[in-house]
Amino acid sequence: MVSKNTICLWYDGTALDAATFYAETFPDSKVTAVHHAPGDYPAGKQGNVLTVEFTVAGIPCLGLNGGPAFKQTEAFSFQIATDDQAETDRLWNAIVSNGGQESACGWCKDKWGLSWQITPRVLMDAITGPDPAAAKRAFDAMMTMGKIDIAAIEKARRG
């Protein structure tokens, strides 16, 4: 582990599956190491995959197969900035179609319970822009969406 700060994500025996999916789905992502337990532990046996080192969109992570004691919550999410509708659709659909679920305002959850914000840069520009009326229109449009529709955000921004 090279990074001084690494995000540790808790899984119930599926850290390698999750890390592999993320590596195949998100740019600048990869599985870098798989570590097996040197002895028995509360959630597993010696030799089981204990931790997986991986990177998601350039962010170092550690997947810990800690067992069923803790679940992911929406209090933590990855926010992935997208450049166009095709990228937004690809990432959203990859998560949702792989056993995940849709949510509101660009959020979705993967099958391991981890939350993702698939956020077009256009949306962030629109809701943080200097024109408060345009920002409100874009924000109000976003509040009605699941997956973000860039054309609808741009239309709302223009008024």
Image: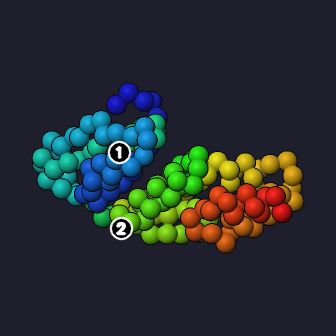
What residue does disc 2 label? 99
Which residue is the extreme one toward the top? Answer: 2
Which residue is the extreme one toward the bottom? Answer: 144
Residue 22 image position (x, y, % from top left): 37, 49
Residue 6 seen: no
- Compute the Cα span from label 2 to label 1: 17 Å
Residue 108 left/right relative to 21: right
How many numbered marks appear? 2
Query: Is disc 1 surrounded by few (<14), some (14 to 19) or many (20+) residues within 10 Å?
Result: some
State the residue in front, 28 or 56.
28
**Amino acid marked by disc 1:** Ala
State the residue in front, 91 or 4.
91
Where residue 139 sits, quadrant-wise, is bottom right
Residue 21 image position (x, y, % from top left): 33, 52
Residue 59 seen: yes
Residue 33 image position (x, y, % from top left): 26, 37
What residue does disc 1 label? 23
Q: Residue at x 83, y 63 (%)?
A: 159
